[in-house]
Image (spheres, grey):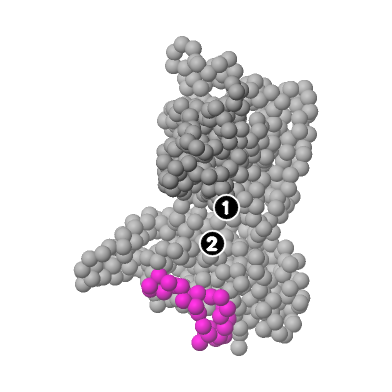
Amino acid sequence: MNPALRKLVRKGPPSAGDVDRFVADAVFPLVDGTDVTFVYRGGADEVYLRCWIAGLNMAQPLQHLAGSDLWAVTMELPEQSRIEYKFEVVRGGKRELVLDPLNPVLAHDPFGANSVCQGYRYVRPDWTEHDDETRQGSIEIVEVESKTFRERRAVQVYMPARFRENRRYPLLVVHDGQDYLRYAALKTVLDNLIHRLEIPQIIVAMTDSPDRLKEYAGNDAHAAFLASDLLPLMADRFPLVDASRARGIMGASFGGVASLHAAWRHPDLFGRLLLQSGSFAFSDFGAHQRGPVFDPVVRFMNEFRENPGQPGEKIYMSCGVYESLIYENRTLVPRLQAQGVNVKFEEARDAHNWENWRDRLRNGLSWLFPGPVWMVYE
Amino acid sequence: MAAHFLLGPQRPIVNIDLAFNALGDGGPAAVVSAGWQDAEGDIKEVQEIAARPLIDLHLYQRAEDVLASEAGLQELYRERQNRLQELQRLYRLRLRQSMLAARRLLRVDGDPAVVQHEQRHAIAQQRALDRHHLQRIAAIHKEFDTRVANERLPKLREHAKEIAHVFAGCQSVVITGGNVAVLLNRLRLFDVGSIIKTKHIVAWSAGAMALTDRVVLFHDNTPQGRRDAEVFEQGLGIVNDIVLLPDAKHRLDVSDKIHVALFCRRFAPTNCFTLNSGSLLRFDDGRVIGAEDVRRLSRSGALRKVRAQ
């Protein structure tokens, strides 16, 4: 049991006042080195910890501390871990998923929010947060008239601070751009890394799909949209370096699949790939177990594994060790390296979520697009 | 008597006004902002503070023009740059091993009579490598200069004449920060060093580094990890026997005392000075006569406040 919790109950059931004081003073969950104790306060029949860690029982029961309205469970969490969780509270036969009322740290995603457990020695990187000293880039909306999809699509284009028409910039195409902006602080990260000279000034096209599970799943039409609709428009509207080494593509989860697929379909187009927790499901034989939405992904990945070609010159990959996709991602690395691709692969003690992807952006972007920081003394 | 003001980054703290106020004359100043590359000449903010006419020399653009016009020079220039880059790459290979050994030795405990001797020798080897590297750089520049002297270069002469004309009307010179390699190349191409050594100079960050006789690149906090500080170039040698470390607050890991001590001992007796935003170092005739928020790296690994001599 956590020492603070043990102290609270050592003389028997604590009074309501004792619990009030304990709750007011402590930071939840209780982190004691690599032991993390999750605490729920309230009346319930049962309480479970729900965290999305591959290989761990999805629902860890919390123990009721006799004579109090506290529930707790302790688990070992390696240092620098970061996990997202909710409590499942059972009352009168009804089950409800709730945020941890005692923990104000939340992570948001398209499905809502989760409570965040920042494990021992996890610190949110400062470059993911607003910095008053940093010059701000800007975002403008560009309408792409897509011949491929026969419709107009809006793309958000990031332009760095001190943008100039008379110079040329590398281009990065981002899948799920809106989510990267909202949940992974992409604009803040770009502003900070550019300001710190860790990446060059860069133009970033943030795309979104109305049907990402279809279009990002190894879809030729999507690759054609990028190659034939988006890139020509970007080259026409913005001063870009016309070289594959100055053209990157990135995405997370299915966005990682879409990035790899587009680079594979158009091998001379993108020289730099940033693939985060790519949903690179494949099957060596027989059917896969990930559900029908993965069917086209598996078809693509199986074909890719047979004939990978050279989908880029440099590929940065990252994946959380607490997600089931770690196996697929680890498997892909030697396959790419065997093709002569310069691959950097990083694992994080995190899971399949936007803040994991946010926290890896500095390493990935600065490796793919090194900035002039070594030579520049402003 | 020429006054040289060496400053740290002008963000977030702007202090070029202190230097301009100290100069006092109010006369026009020539500006070198070539380190900003494409943003060269964007000196509106400096202009507002300087309270005097500023004339940007556009050395970056002039160099582009010269190299585009003078094919022979462009070839020699490219050849020199390739050789310098290759030399730097080879130096880096040796540097990594040499620094690794020195760092490890400085962390060794044991019989002082044995350990200290080996530590001194490791640092001496490092110093010898740095010295050798600088000599090789000098040799490459000398050869380039000799070959260029034999070329007819009308475009270069034309720009050099215009630059000299601007300098003739200015008692002071401003050199901004930016890319130190680009800046040094442009200063050298137009032989600016020989013209400005008698003038008052206000320079910050890369501009200040370029005025010294030895430019050392450093950064302990790059995204891909710490890199060993590298001797990179000869500077203009207008201010001698100092190594300047702009923005050390962000670039130098001062929490690692052995790292700082090694940095100090590697370049001793040359002093290594930090120049953070808000720092000001004033040299008159080679003497420090003013220092605000400047620290010197010491053999103990501590940072010592620099005082005027």
- In the figure, is residue A141 to the left or right of A59? right
Q: Position of residue A23 (x, y in %)?
A: 55, 46
What chain does mark 2 sit on? B
Residue, x 66% and y 33% (percent of image)? A112
Which image quadrant is residue B87 in? bottom left
Q: Residue B180's spot in the image, x, y percent?
A: 56, 63
Question: Most prominent secondary structure in the magenta stretch?
Answer: strand
Residue at (57%, 69%) from the top-left corner?
B276
Q: Nearer the viewer, mark 1 or mark 2?
A: 1
Q: Give the residues drawn in magenta, as a range.
A: B281-309
Numbered circle sitting on residue B88:
none
> Residue A126, labelled with which disc?
1
Q: Residue at x 53, y 48 (%)?
A: A18
Chain where mark 1 sits: A
Residue B226 rendering spot, x and y as whole percentages: 45, 55
Q: Nearer the viewer, residue A245 or B13?
A: B13
For disc 2, the neighbor class at 10 Å (few under 14, some 14 to 19, many from 20) is some
Q: Is residue A7 above or below residue A60?
A: below
Q: Secondary structure at mark 1?
A: helix
Residue of label 2? B250
